[in-house]
């Protein structure tokens, strides 16, 4: 198929080209570093499929325009599908494929890296030492061993997080619509979210963004957590109310916040914006807080994951071409 690949960075281009070559170049991949929106969809003229990433706009309007252009397939290089209007795609007969499992370990390890960095303040120590400041004041952390961590969503990624934390000697509580018996046998205790929140030294989010999970962690939920609690979100920005988290950090009602995702990230992430500075006011205020750590959606970003994503995406395109 001729495929218009949107939001293509050099690492995507390299990995997809390699994966396509490994299969004997079944697809003509045309790479574009712009985002897919209703305004940029025309770039895909003449293609049979588009390949997208998390911040591309695959809403009803884009899909309608794609359908008019004869595009019948969408392959997203992500596990999450919340950027795609599945109902509209269905109505228009556009097939959608994602990469449900590529490297849950990479994302899980990153969530734990955020916990450890925030806890032991390694990001602050890094800056201090570069300026010749070896003082330890303000860098006091806590042992992870024995602490209670709440995991929301124990699918592929959440399950890896649970196992890493159990290995560190944490008490692991979980909330999911579906409990995993193997995790229960390993020592994870499932309970309703309201019951879990007051017990959490750390809360980490690993469920998908759905209508049912949008703003799951809002001001009220944060209020239920202990004042010293750490909140980690490597899943999707829309799962939490970032404004409420910022207010709670400022008021001393939340201990720390580590986020790799942000609800408004589509206008910001994956680009070098160092010349303009941060135009998003909430994010600018958040990154100025010492107890907040923000990264730009990089939890998935390991060489193993990139390779797997590319391999599965090429296979998804081939499957859709065969229909
Ligand atoms: P998964 O489908 O394997 O697991 C999701 C889990 O969430 C399942 O156990 C499911 O039962 C649970 N769940 C569904 N609805 C729920 C609800 N209402 N309340 C509580 N739990 C609910 O998915 P995964 O591979 O573990 O990925 C989880 C999420 O991580 C993805 O949806 C994606 O948004 C995010 N993600 C982020 C990155 C990144 O780079 N930051 C990378 C990959 C995935």
Image: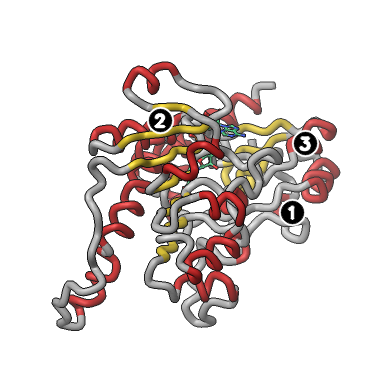
- In this rendering, the answer to whether 251 lies above or below 84 is below
Where is residue 192 drawn, in percent x and y?
55, 32
Image position of 26 (left or right of 62)? left
Q: CA distance from mark 1 to mark 3?
A: 15 Å
Q: CA distance from mark 2 to mark 3?
A: 31 Å
The C terminus, quarter of image: top right
Q: Callout 1: helix, strand or loop?
A: helix
Image position of 205 (left or right of 53)? left
Q: Residue drawn at (45%, 71%), measured in percent from left and top?
A: 287
Query: What number is the disc on residue 41?
Result: 1
Residue 223 vs residue 278, the one in the foreground = 223
Q: CA distance from mark 2 to mark 1?
A: 37 Å
Label 2 beta carbon within 8 A of ligand 1: yes
Mark 3, Cα crowd under 10 Å, few <14 / some 14-19 / many 20+, is many
Where is residue 265 drawn, in percent x and y?
58, 61
Q: Callout 2: helix, strand or loop?
A: helix
Q: Quadrant of residue 87?
A: top right
* Residue hosting label 3: 89
Query: What number is the disc on residue 159?
Result: 2
Mark 2, Cα crowd under 10 Å, few <14 / some 14-19 / many 20+, is many
Q: Quadrant of residue 163?
A: top left
Badge 2 or badge 1: first in the primary sequence: 1
Identify the coloring: secondary structure
Label 1 beta carbon within 8 A of ligand 1: no
Image position of 64 (left or right of 270)? right
Badge 2 or badge 3: first in the primary sequence: 3
Q: Callout 3: helix, strand or loop?
A: helix
């Amino acid at each position: 198929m001729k495929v218009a690949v949107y939001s293509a960075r050099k690492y995507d281009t390299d990995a997809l080209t390699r994966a396509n070559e490994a299969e004997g170049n079944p697809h003509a991949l045309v790479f574009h570093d712009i985002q897919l929106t209703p305004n940029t969809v025309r770039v895909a003229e003449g293609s049979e499929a588009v390949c997208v990433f998390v911040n591309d706009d695959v809403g009803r309007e884009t899909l309608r325009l794609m359908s008019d252009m004869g595009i019948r397939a969408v392959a997203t290089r992500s596990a999450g599908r919340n950027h795609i209007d599945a109902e509209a795609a269905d109505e228009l007969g556009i097939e959608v494929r994602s990469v449900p499992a590529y490297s849950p370990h990479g994302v899980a390890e990153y969530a734990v890296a955020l916990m450890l960095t925030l806890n032991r303040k390694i990001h602050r120590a890094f800056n201090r030492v570069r300026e010749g400041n070896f003082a330890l004041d303000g860098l006091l952390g806590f042992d992870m061993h024995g602490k209670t961590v709440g995991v929301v969503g124990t699918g592929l990624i959440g399950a890896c997080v649970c196992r890493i934390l159990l290995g560190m000697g944490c008490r692991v509580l979980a909330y999911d619509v579906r409990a995993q018996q193997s995790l229960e046998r390993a020592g994870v205790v499932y309970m309703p979210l309201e019951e879990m929140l007051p017990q959490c030294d750390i809360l980490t989010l690993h469920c998908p963004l759905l209508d049912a999970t949008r703003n799951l962690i809002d001001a009220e939920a944060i209020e239920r957590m202990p004042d010293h609690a750490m909140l980690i979100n490597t899943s999707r920005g829309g799962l939490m109310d970032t404004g409420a988290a910022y207010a709670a950090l400022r008021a001393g009602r939340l201990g720390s916040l580590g986020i790799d995702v942000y609800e408004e990230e589509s206008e910001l992430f994956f680009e070098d914006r160092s010349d303009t500075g941060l135009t998003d006011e909430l994010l600018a205020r958040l990154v100025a807080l010492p107890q907040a750590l923000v990264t730009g959606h990089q939890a998935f970003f390991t060489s193993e994951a990139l390779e797997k994503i590319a391999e599965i995406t090429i296979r998804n395109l081939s499957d859709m071409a065969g229909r």
